[in-house]
Image (spheres, rainbow, N blue to C red):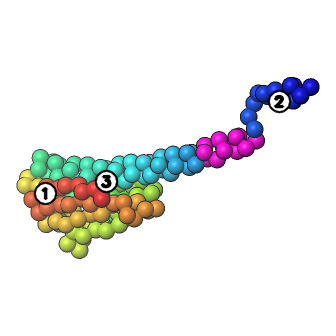
Amino acid sequence: MIQTFFKKRGGFTFTELMIVIAIMTVLLTVVFFNFKTVGSKQNLDKTTLTIFSVLNEAKSNSISSKDFSDHGVHLETNQITSFKGSTFTVGAPGNQVFTLLTNATISNISIGGSQDVVFRNVTGLTSASGTITISLTNDTTRHDVINIFSSGTMQITHF
């Protein structure tokens, strides 16, 4: 009888199960927040590259003298618009509007007091040199900056 009382029983104790559940909860929390951060960073990168690509397309259209015209990009906090000509007109037939992702925004436009970057026909030069800052709406410490130079060249800096 004493021998059967001290016989090893199979299975886990309640304490062991609680410890395993606590460890799994901590690990899943860390993984979840890391994936959330990675997803936000990818959205920031995607938004920055979209803006950069639209600017490059406008510059290329100007250099190639497409439609014998200047080409530009109008910048707003939640969207950008590619346009033909030296001035932006809302609703013009050739305008292409690009809506930015919901958690990324243009937080600062410092291009000579304007919201338009216009590239000159044939030369691709611009008088709107400066910076465009793209930030995450839920984490303003993470942002990218597009530098635009008067020569028409551009560069992206990640912060």
Q: Give the position of the C terminus as an image quadrant.
A: bottom left
Disc 1 marks a residue whose amino acid type is Gly
Q: Is 21 on the left or on the right of 121, as rendered?
A: right
Image: magenta residue range: 14-25
Q: CA distance from mark 1 to mark 3?
A: 17 Å
In this view, the mark in front (2 or 3): 2
Residue 30 on image: x %, y %: 52, 49
| CB contact under 8 Å: marks 1 and 3 | no
Q: Which residue corresponds to mark 1?
A: 152
Three-letter amino acid code at the position of disc 3: Thr
Residue type at mark 2? Phe
- Which badge, 2 or 1, comes first in the chain's sequence? 2
Front residue (pair 19, 3): 3
Q: Which SS class for mark 2?
A: loop
**Label annotation for residue 48:** 3
What residue is shown with label 2? 6
